[in-house]
């Protein structure tokens, strides 16, 4: 399964870019200056910039426009996390816990899926993994009364700062772990100053980006409904996240039942005066997960954040909690069979998904670009983007394959963010034979586009998950 889990991380290395990967492609283009990219594209985005900056520096060393080239760093981050899942797992937890944790990590459906994507999630998983193990070491030293070297605090602060500059859920995990460590230091009456200095330095460094980025998103009205996930519901988020973490609802249910049973058994052991193995480690892991989930749930009342992939940052904590809970029954044949079956099921289902995707799922923006260049090479292309308020990089994103990949600088590609009805009408009236493209097409989005522009669009042809739009007969006649 280790071999299969590593091999399957390469499966989607050569497919076309997905929607969000196009943003990575344009923000890591070495033909532009990094300060200009940061100011005009990254600062007004909804995520921190570390991954994009690393990809930019990587492309400055050598630049190839092929998709696989931009995905190589993500695959490397994912493979490095596989090594770290075994190598950095504390020896005192025992070989069984290390094997279970490494197995869950290597065979995670979602970690295999996101491994080759030119997005920040492989780096996020790696940094979260490293930061968790450093935090656990400090946590153990606090409760054992051992001295914590300054180098350990510095490693904790640096890894936490990098985590925060990779994703804002990384900031949440860093702060949640800090709360747990601060509580432990207060209970054990340890010196708080090294912790406070390191936390203040790391969090202050994160704020240097977070504050202007937050102000930029406020100016774009992100917290007033202008957010691509604003239409989702809490019920959808909870069920999708449950499926996301373990690969299926029934698996999630079985693991929840198992963990609940372990908690009941441990409570019985404590009340009877007996010891519970690795209780403090489990308290730390459970505390971090609980603080992050509760914070995200409360924030989602104002800004919906229950997006499953954001929770990849919690995978190390959840998987290690399950591994430590299961490690107590290492001699149980039923438990070994269940855990082996879980890993094997993820390998099997991911293999089937990969085969289905290659055979039946199109190449999205690349597919439509090929269609346009083949069928309408001499015409103008207008693109409507409805996923929230697009950043200016949208123009570069949706023209990437036409301009950069195929080198067709003679073609006119314009992103219309849907403009007010009269302005859109004037543009289209001046270009009656132009081709209109709606990414990630659906009848609901076409209906919304009609409402925003006041124009009667119709669905002419589907190309992958996108569609070509035209006008209804009465609208075309009026034009």
Image: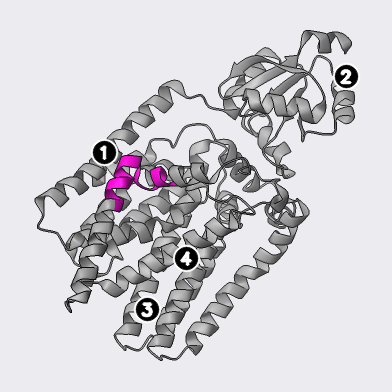
Quick check: 467 left or right of 260? right
Q: Is residue 162 above or below residue 479?
A: below
Q: Mark 3: few, some, or many residues within 10 Å (few <14, many ≥20)?
A: many
Nearest the viewer among 3 and 465 is 465
Q: Reading the chain from its start, which is encountered first: label 3 or label 2?
A: 3
Q: Nearer the viewer, mark 4 or mark 1?
A: 4
Q: Reading the chain from its start, which is encountered first: label 4 or label 3?
A: 3
Q: Reading the chain from its start, which is encountered first: label 3 or label 1?
A: 3
> Badge 3 is on which residue?
138
> Badge 2 is on which residue?
429
Q: Mark 4 and 1 residues: CB-CB less than 8 Å, in contact?
A: no
| Segment colored magenta | 241-256
Q: Quadrant of the C terminus?
A: top right
> Residue 468 placed where, x, y %?
67, 19
> Badge 1 is on which residue?
345
Disc 4/disc 2 C-alpha distance (Å): 54 Å
Asked if the magenta segment contains residue 462, the reply would be: no
Q: Nearer the viewer, mark 1 or mark 2?
A: 1
Quick check: 471 left or right of 406? right
> Residue 325 placed where, x, y %?
24, 61
Q: Tell me the SS state at disc 3.
A: helix
Disc 4/disc 3 C-alpha distance (Å): 19 Å
Quick check: 359 left or right of 370? left
The mark found on residue 376 in the picture is none
Our reading of the magenta stretch's main secondary structure is helix
Q: Which residue appears at 11% of the width and 54% of the height?
A: 332
Quick check: 217 left or right of 140? right
> Badge 4 is on which residue?
291
């Amino acid at each position: 399964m280790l071999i299969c889990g590593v091999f399957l991380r390469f499966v989607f290395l050569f497919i076309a870019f997905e929607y969000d990967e196009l943003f990575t492609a344009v923000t890591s283009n070495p033909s532009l200056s990094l300060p200009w990219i940061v100011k005009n594209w990254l600062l007004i985005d909804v995520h921190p910039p570390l991954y994009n900056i690393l990809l930019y520096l990587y492309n400055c060393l050598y630049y190839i426009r092929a998709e696989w080239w931009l995905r190589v760093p993500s695959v490397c981050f994912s493979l490095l996390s596989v090594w770290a899942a075994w190598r950095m797992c504390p020896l005192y937890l025992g070989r069984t816990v290390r094997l279970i944790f490494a197995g869950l990590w290597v065979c995670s459906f979602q970690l295999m899926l996101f491994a080759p994507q030119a997005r920040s999630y492989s780096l996020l998983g790696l940094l979260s993994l490293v930061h968790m193990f450093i935090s656990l070491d400090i946590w153990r030293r606090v409760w054992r009364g051992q001295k914590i070297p300054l180098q350990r605090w510095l490693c904790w602060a640096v890894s936490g700062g990098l985590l925060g500059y990779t994703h804002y859920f990384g900031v949440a995990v860093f702060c949640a772990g800090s709360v747990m460590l601060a509580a432990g230091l207060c209970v054990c009456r340890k010196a708080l100053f090294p912790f406070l200095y390191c936390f203040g330095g790391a969090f202050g460094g994160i704020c240097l980006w977070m504050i202007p980025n937050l102000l930029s998103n406020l100016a774009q009205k992100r917290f007033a409904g202008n957010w691509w996930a604003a239409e989702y519901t809490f019920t959808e988020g909870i069920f999708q996240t449950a499926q996301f973490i373990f690969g299926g609802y029934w698996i999630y249910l079985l693991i929840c039942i198992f963990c609940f049973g372990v908690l009941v058994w441990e409570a019985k052991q404590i009340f009877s005066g007996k010891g519970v193995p690795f209780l403090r480690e489990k308290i730390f892991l459970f505390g971090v997960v609980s603080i992050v989930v509760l914070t995200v749930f409360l924030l989602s009342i104002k800004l919906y954040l229950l997006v499953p992939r954001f929770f990849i940052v919690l995978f190390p904590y959840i998987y290690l909690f399950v591994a430590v809970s299961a490690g107590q029954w290492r001699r149980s044949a039923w438990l070994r069979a269940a855990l082996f079956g879980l890993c094997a099921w993820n390998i099997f289902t991911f293999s089937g998904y990969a085969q289905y995707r290659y055979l039946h799922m199109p190449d999205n923006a690349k597919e439509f670009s090929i269609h346009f260049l083949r069928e309408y090479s001499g015409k103008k292309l207008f693109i409507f983007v409805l996923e929230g308020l697009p950043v200016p990089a949208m123009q570069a994103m949706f023209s990437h394959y036409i301009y950069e990949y195929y080198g067709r600088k003679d073609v006119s590609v314009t992103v219309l963010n849907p403009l007010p009805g009269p302005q859109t009408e004037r543009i289209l009236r001046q270009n009656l034979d132009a081709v209109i493209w709606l990414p990630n097409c659906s009848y609901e989005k076409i209906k919304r586009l009609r409402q925003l522009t006041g124009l009667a669009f119709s669905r002419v042809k589907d190309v992958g998950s996108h569609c070509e739009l035209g006008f209804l007969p009465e609208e075309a006649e009026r034009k």
